[in-house]
Amino acid sequence: MASVRVTQLSKRFGPFHALCPSDLDIEDGEFVVIVGPSGCGKSTLLRLIAGLEEPSGGQVFIDSRDVTDVAPAQRGLAMVFQSYALYPHLTVEENIAFPLKVQRLGKAEVRSRVEAATEALQLTALLKRRPAALSGGQRQRVSIARAIVREPRVLLLDEPLSNLDAELRVRMRHEFARLHGRLGATMIYVTHDQLEAMTLANRIVVMSEGRIEQVGAPLELYVSPATLAVARAIGSPGMNLIPAVLQVVDEQGVVVRLPGGERLRADVRAPSDAVGEAVTVGLRPEHLVADDAGPLGGEVELFERLGPLSFAHLGARGGIDTVVAQLPGDRVITLGEALRFGVPPAQVHVFDAQGIALPRLSP
Ligand SMILES: Nc1ncnc2c1ncn2[C@@H]1O[C@H](COP(=O)(O)OP(=O)(O)OP(=O)(O)O)[C@@H](O)[C@H]1O
Ligand SMILES: [Mg+2]
């Protein structure tokens, strides 16, 4: 177990900033998940921490020790990649024991560590098989076992489940949660998967265009995204984002005008000279409340029934993109049906022209 800290860490590839100078503090034993759109620098950050990439600037600390110039193998961490590179000619057992053989540990020690890792990942029945005779999920479990057998102080995982089917992903997600509970290791986990991020993380790091946008507990980011990039990155289906104009600023907050001329109140604070400025309104699908006189409406273009709840997609119109509304699972809907919604002012997010969230009125 170890804490990880990066200060002003950056990476340039030629003139291109893959990672702008960034600070991040990860506590001992934390499970931190990094999310953000493709190409935003997630793998780069992970590889810099691992020492697989040389930083253009800044430092990496593990347990307050500056490891910026320390070789990857000496940093006390292990990394699991999206593609599990197992040795095809070795059995599961030999694959898992391999890093320990390299370390020249005693036989008994090797056996007990391999046993612990295989039990943790439920691989005991597969020890004598070769990788070719395993399913994708089993192979990925072997590569994770191989990573933890060295008892790393920090485990780095770069989209470890992205090659697996949906059902396996869910099973493996639960295994990661259990594994973290059991090992207590510090974990830094990159994923595109909303559910993995929301359920596994103690804290989520949202990245965008080589920058850390916001760091916080999953619900904190979900409820109070600080920027448009965070609003886009967290939540599935995502937050509805609608261009609007700030029309009124008063003691109760603001009123925005939507592209069709409808007005919507939000209890956020804005400077009074911001009236007339372009903003973006953010509305979570579950905050749309059926209201015949509400400002949002449209015809149902697509309807997704998930069982306990449903999502109605209202067709784009008048400058507003498709709006997604969450409905009860038993709500009867016909395609083309016209629906109207309102949103309580406390649930309306407003982002300024720079994509920064306007602060809530103090309660
Ligand atoms: N060796 C390299 N040379 C040049 N550019 C690179 C190199 N490695 C990464 N990049 C660029 O740096 C940016 C960040 O890449 P990175 O792999 O960190 O993204 P990512 O967030 O992990 O994306 P994904 O979700 O697709 O894996 C990308 O634009 C990528 O093209
Ligand atoms: Mg990546």
Image (cartoon, grey):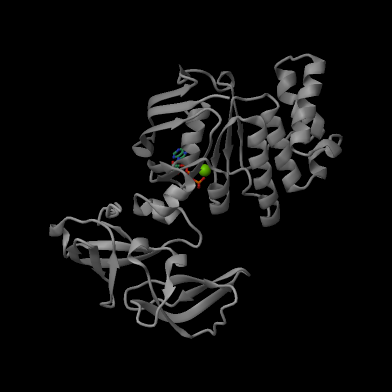
User: For this view, does 202 lie left or right of residue 101?
Assistant: left
Q: Is residue 34 visible?
A: yes
Residue drawn at x 35%, y 73% as measured from the top left:
320
Residue 112: x percent and y percent? 79, 23
Q: Is residue 93 above or below residue 274?
A: above
Toward which corner of the image does residue 274 lie, by quadrant?
A: bottom left
Residue that lies at the very extreme toward the front in this rendered image: 363
Foreground residue, 59 or 225?
225
**211 in relation to 70, above or below:** below
Is 331 located above or below residue 148 in the figure? Answer: below
Residue name at image x 53 percent, y 19 percent: 71
Q: Position of residue 151 (x, y in %)?
A: 66, 24
Q: Residue furthest left?
A: 273
Q: Is residue 302 left or right of residue 265?
A: right
Q: Position of residue 189 (x, y in %)?
A: 55, 39
Residue 131 relative to residue 42: left or right: right
Answer with the quarter of the image where residue 180 lies: top right
Where does the N terminus fall, quadrant-wise? top right
Residue 55 seen in this snapshot: no
- Relative horizontal placement of residue 41, taking residue 74 as reference (left or right): left
Q: Position of residue 285 (x, y in %)?
A: 45, 66
Q: Nearer the viewer, residue 238 or 184?
A: 184
Between 173 and 143, which is closer to the camera in this rendering? 173
Please give the name of the residue rendered at 19% of the width and 61% of the height, measured from the top-left corner: 251
